[in-house]
Image (cartoon, rainbow, N blue to C red):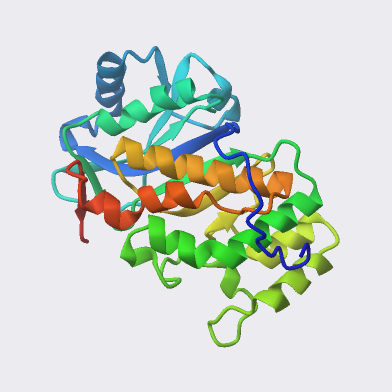
Amino acid sequence: VDMFQIETKDGSNFGTYRPNGFELEFYVPEEFGDYNALISYLKEKHGWKKVYTSNKDPEVYKDETSAGVIERDESLAAMSGLAPVEYASRIMNSKKDEEECLKIMDSFDKGYASVHCSLHQHISTEGFNLDTYKRLVKRMMQHEEEIVRDFAAPERHENKLLYATYISRNLSSNGKRDYPFLCVMVDMCEDLDQLRDMVGYGRKYKTLNIMPKHTVEFRYMNANFDSHFVEAFLQFNRDFVNSAVNNDGTHMNRPLKNKFNWMQNISKDTKTVLRRL
């Protein structure tokens, strides 16, 4: 059971909050290409006291008086009439913190994004040891196809996204998953550095990125501006991590995933404007 992380469906205490943060790549009207104007607008609209313009000092994410960091996103392609930005929340330690940071979703009447805009989540690895990382990696290898299919846009299904490829396709010669073999290879890793090499080949561009020092990062999600959907996505990943930490028999919060999936979202989301490139 432990080697292959067979799901027993025993109970899990879903809903427990674990420190985390999110990054949202999106576009704003070009008049806010002046980021001083954008930050002034956000502070006034949301009542935010402070928004940083650089994360060179990572301590800015710990500032509880700040909403986070707004930067120009050079990785996004130009789009007529719009300016590309990335918002990174401060570290959120409670639902109250999360509610404050999710105000970014309601900054404009419409939320503009391209199919390449992402929503990433970093979750604290406090209390992790090597076995915890291994359990989390195995569970993601086992379930990631279902998770991505249910939460993310079709453009991200079937291992199509180059900057968030499936970890379950690692070491594959035919593009298909060999889960038992992957579990054996995970268990052969003697330390975290070896596991990081095995999972991401020393890079972050995977559905699950375990390269950061103090967090794990979920990279499979596309930008979205339905705050209820995003809130569910953030909670689902926290539950997934907490279940691995506690070695619970139920791996995923399926009721949450089934209620807030991609198809449910697009049927009622009137805010997100997803532009093709």
221 on left or right of 105:
right
Residue at far right of view = 190
- In the image, residue 14 sits, relative to residue 159, either above or below, namely above
**The image quarter in which residue 141 lies:** bottom right
Q: Pick the residue in front: 55 or 183.
A: 183
User: Which residue corresponds to the image point at 60% horizontal and 66% vertical from the top-left?
Assistant: 142
Picture mark count: 0
164 on left or right of 191:
left
Q: Pick the residue in front: 276 or 20.
A: 20
**The image quarter in which residue 202 lies:** bottom right
Residue at far front of view = 10
User: Which residue corresponds to the image point at 20% horizontal and 60% vertical from the top-left?
Assistant: 276
Q: Pick the residue in front: 180 or 105.
A: 180
Query: Residue 139 appears at what percent x and percent y?
Result: 63, 60
Residue at far bottom of view = 174
User: Which residue corresponds to the image point at 71% horizontal and 45% vertical from the top-left?
Assistant: 245
Question: Is residue 50 at all visible to an observer of this figure?
Answer: yes
Q: Pick the residue in front: 163 or 269.
A: 269
User: Which residue corresponds to the image point at 78% horizontal and 62% vertical from the top-left?
Assistant: 2
Question: Is residue 165 at all visible to an observer of this figure?
Answer: no
**The image quarter in which residue 127 lies:** top right
The quadrant of the rendering that contains the N terminus is bottom right
- In the image, residue 45 sits, relative to residue 71, either above or below, namely above
Query: Residue 277 appears at what percent x and percent y?
Result: 22, 61
Query: Residue 84 appears at what percent x and percent y?
Result: 29, 43
Residue at far left of view = 81
